[in-house]
Image (cartoon, rainbow, N blue to C red):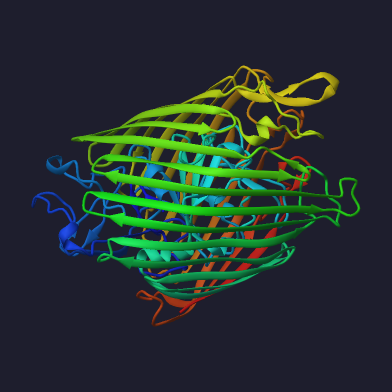
Amino acid sequence: MRIGNCPAAVSGNENGNEGTGSDFWEAAVIRVDAHESEDLPTRAPESPGVKPSVSIEGMVMKTFMRSTGFVLLARFSGAALCLSQVGSQIVSAEDEELPPLVIHGSAMDLLTQDPVVPAKEGLIDSSHPETSPHETIARDLPVSLTDYGGAGALTQVQGFGRGAGETAVEAMGVPLHLPQGVGFDFSVFPAFLWEGYSFQSGLGSLAADPRATGALVTLRPWTSGKLDRGESALVTRAMVSTTEVGQVSLAASDGDNWAAVLGLSQGALRGPSGSLASRVQWDGGRQALTMHVLATQVEADSIGSTRFPTPEAVQSTSRWIPMLQWDRRRARSAMKASLYFDHVDYRYEDSSSFFGSSEIETQQMGAQLGWTDGNWRWGGHGRWIAYQSGDFRAPREGQFMGQLGRTWRLGDLTADAVGEGSAVSQFGVAPAGSLGFRLQLGPNWAGSLRLRGARRAPSLSDRYYDDAFFEPNPVLKPEQVWTGWVGLERATGDLRPSFAMQVQSYSNAWTSLPVAGGENTIGNGGSAWGATFQHDLRWRWTSLWSYRHAVALSASRVSATGKPFARLAPVRVTGGIQASPESGRWRIGIHGRGASAVVEDGTGNSVPGHLAIDLLGGLKLASWAGGGGADGAGLTLGFELRNLFNKYIELVKYYPLPGRTFELVLQGMF
């Protein structure tokens, strides 16, 4: 996970407590290790930087990170290091060619980090009673969700684009969203596998995916976080919910060599999930080989789908992802290369339905390379894709993406230019590029501006539309997407507001068009546009009380249909107030989340607006020595009462979410 332009991990509070957290949305940890003095740059005395043989240990910052993702100040003995995209850069004017030390993360992280537009970071705290990572994201950010309700139901996050298919999701550099052009189902991987996430606007790199112009979500596995920080831990977790879902998990790490998580979901959503990471280092810690495996096998009863399932309906998803990554770092450069394989098997069974059963199998193999040298960065991503739905087998496809970027720093002004391109074996070449500027406005405020253009090739789903015969669509043309961003934020002090506007324009926009016989097909429908204004506020007015809110106002239109983007609510809000002492012994808060009415594309249906109120809390029942940090070990009880007033909420027509629910989690850290 990145904080601004810097590798970081989000895992605790200012007292070193993992899982308890001083509050729900403030905790963050920075750790940068500099083990080899001969490879570290020596800076001028007046330049705050990394000195030889310095170890910057993990420390917790009051930064309201769960929604803004900004860090301005990092303190450590005898030195200071500023790693924020908002604050001062890591280098002074005299040594502006020296890059930040990039130690953690994947090759994708090197290519998608943006020194101009800050990412929003969040903590997926295992002491909070959540079953899926999308629950944390939906609480932190005013994003639109596609959720068919019920345990294990299809749940997707829609960023700035027209749908979930335009929001890329990755972990360890591996694309988790399915390559045939549909979004990632967050319900498949339980919350206990993750420690945090990063949300980047649609200005990110094509290295994520040729279609990802909406947003990029990076999920941070608990296992890779522990290895990156060299932390030893043993964590047990048990969660129960009135939605008839239970989870138990055990996570362990020895620090630098291995980490593992294994858990079991039970009830309406059931099956094992796990993550395993192992690392070997040599060359004085300057080179490392990391093996990571992420796997899940979950089954859900009577889940929501467009097939209106009966009580006998069952969906099962099997997915396993092995990945191997090589890291090499020097004083002025860092290189990361990885290989991965991804197998997904999705099955739907309904013995009492006309549709019976269906199966979708997807496989992808990929390789990534990322390199930073001074203020230059370059690399690429290639993957081979196989997709089969029932008896239909789409043509095998290769996707290749490349990038070259350069950053300039002139006093308070940062400029960044990126040239990109992608090639799809079944369709051709699609160029892209962006230019961005960031200006420090005094000690507290910073403004950002970025423009990006990308030519997008259609996905497998677009080119083989889902009718009875999966006929090809040879007339479908690429679409051109232009994106602009302007932002202003304050990242210091107890009151931290931010404002941003993102605008997207589509030419040759893909849309559903009627054809003879009453069927619909995907075609180029002219133009489309979308605009979103965002406002975040984080305010800690005493050491006990804190407040936050986030608002998104969106407008959009597809010229061919005259309708706005599907399921993109014009108004989305989230926020709350919380009390938590500095000791982190307890926490209590009230949280609200809501959205205005939305339309569903091509159906004429609309989903009414909603506002739900949640109560959240936690209590440290016991503390003991150990756990890898001061006061870090102990027994924690967390609870959440969702939808307090039992409101009827639909995010998808005819598929209501559960009403009032109660979740309880008990976590022990040793």
Q: In the image, is residue 608 above or below residue 514?
A: below
Q: Quadrant of the C terminus?
A: bottom left
What x and y, as percent, mark residue 368? 44, 47
Q: In the image, is residue 187 above or below residue 504?
A: below
- Residue at x 59% of width, y 25% of height: 556
> Of 648 and 359, which appears nearest the observer?
359
User: Quarter of the image holding residue 114?
Assistant: top left
Q: In the image, is residue 172 above or below residue 560?
A: below
- Residue at x 28% of width, y 39% of height: 376
Q: In the image, is residue 577 above or below residue 297?
A: above
How many numbered circles are shown? 0
> Of 42 and 430, which appears nearest the observer?
430
- Residue at x 76% of width, y 32% of height: 605
Query: Going by the picture, which residue comes out furthest to the left?
Result: 45
**Does residue 474 appear left or right of residue 332 in this picture?**
right
What x and y, as percent, mark residue 468? 82, 35
**Does residue 425 appear left or right of residue 361 in this picture?**
left
> Of 533 and 232, which appears nearest the observer?
232
